[in-house]
Image (cartoon, grey):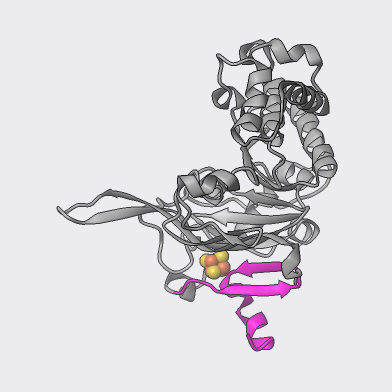
Amino acid sequence: MADQRDILLDVEDVKIYYPVAGKKFGTADYVKAVDGVSFEVRRGEVFGIVGESGCGKSTLGRGICKLERPTSGKIILDGEDISTYHDKQMRPVRKKVQMVFQDPYASLNPRMSVFDIIAEPMIIHKLVKDKAQMEERVLDLLRRVGLDDYHANRYPHEFSGGQRQRIGIARALAVQPSLIIADEPVSALDVSIQAQVLNLMNKLKKEFHLTYIFVAHDLSVVEHISDRVGVMYLGNFVEVGNKESLYTSPLHPYTQALLSAVPVPDPTAKKERVILEGSIPSPLNPPKGCKFHTRCPKAMECCKTEAPKRYQVSEDHYVYCHLYDDINKKNNL
Ligand code: SF4
């Protein structure tokens, strides 16, 4: 169990629902994009969130920094409960938590030079006292993300995808945040460039004492960078564990299926592929009981009606699945 002082972010039972028009006048159905998620992020770690597209992982990332308004639940950042903060209250908090997006081109203003893009957040948050200090800091950030001084006067369209992501990272670093939420930051890049950007993020993490939440659908990418990993399915975590334990001994049938599809470097190595039947059900009308039961190869009768509890399997590894009911009975939980 992590010491409370080591916890940078504490997310408690967060739900993010979107109302959609109901069948009858006056009623509303809800898309349950995030459906009661709890987890902690420790200072200095990389917490990976992985799952198929539509599982709610990006919505959760955006909800933590309040780009999406959570319907309920608590978000405690560095001891401060920001759950109900409105935009004005969030302004100073935005200095602590920054996002890096999948498509840096869409998130960089095409009419602004790279210098202005990186300088803008420093000006908004009053982090520089004069022009000379601003120039020094912008050029320092450019060098730290592997770009050159002359790039400062260029515009986003003059850069490759990988370079644009470096600019997006420099912009996020400009306010000296403690937490960066990276939402699929390398999935739009070629594989060789992906590795460069991941290595850069690792280097910057050490240099700036950062903590990351790294959201991605690619299990290999998440494995490369994360210390702990949460696997999401239909708006909930199904398993959370430290990387070694989760990747070598996955417990949840969904995690096992996802990992069985990851190619291994040795083509002669035997690996049994678990093929999941059907597609992800709609978050508008998720299955009762365990939400995974309609696709689970190990589903039992109880899975159709009872949502599984959280079962702590080892100190840093827990799972939501009835297959582990006995563990709780043994531990008297
Ligand atoms: Fe499968 Fe049941 Fe476990 Fe859900 S609770 S993952 S349906 S065995």
Q: Is residue 206 left or right of residue 71?
A: right
- Residue 266: in sight, yes or no? no
Residue situated furthest front in the rendering: 129
Q: Looking at the image, is 57 positioned above or below residue 170? A: below
Residue 40 appears in which quarter of the rendering?
Answer: bottom right
User: Residue 207: x percent and y percent?
Assistant: 85, 40
User: Residue 248: x percent and y percent?
Assistant: 78, 58
Q: In the image shown, does 314 or 73 lie closer to the viewer?
A: 73
Which region is colored magenta?
A: 306-333
Identified at 84% across, 44% down, the residue is 206
Q: In the image shown, does 264 or 273 lie closer to the viewer?
A: 264
Magenta stretch containing residue 10, yes or no? no
Q: Looking at the image, is 306 positioned above or below residue 178? A: below
Q: Quadrant of the C terminus?
A: bottom right
Q: Quadrant of the N terminus?
A: bottom right
Count the marks: 0
Q: Looking at the image, is 293 positioned above or below residue 284? A: below
Identified at 67% across, 18% down, the residue is 114
Q: Is residue 170 left or right of residue 83?
A: right
Q: Looking at the image, is 221 positioned above or below residue 238? A: above
Magenta stretch containing residue 320, yes or no? yes
User: Residue 306: x percent and y percent?
Assistant: 46, 74
Q: In the image shown, does 6 or 215 lie closer to the viewer?
A: 6
- Residue 274: in sight, yes or no? yes
Ligand 1 quarter of the rendering: bottom right
User: Residue 241: x percent and y percent?
Assistant: 71, 62
Q: Is residue 324 left or right of residue 140?
A: left
Residue situated furthest left in the rendering: 25
Identified at 48% across, 45% down, the residue is 88
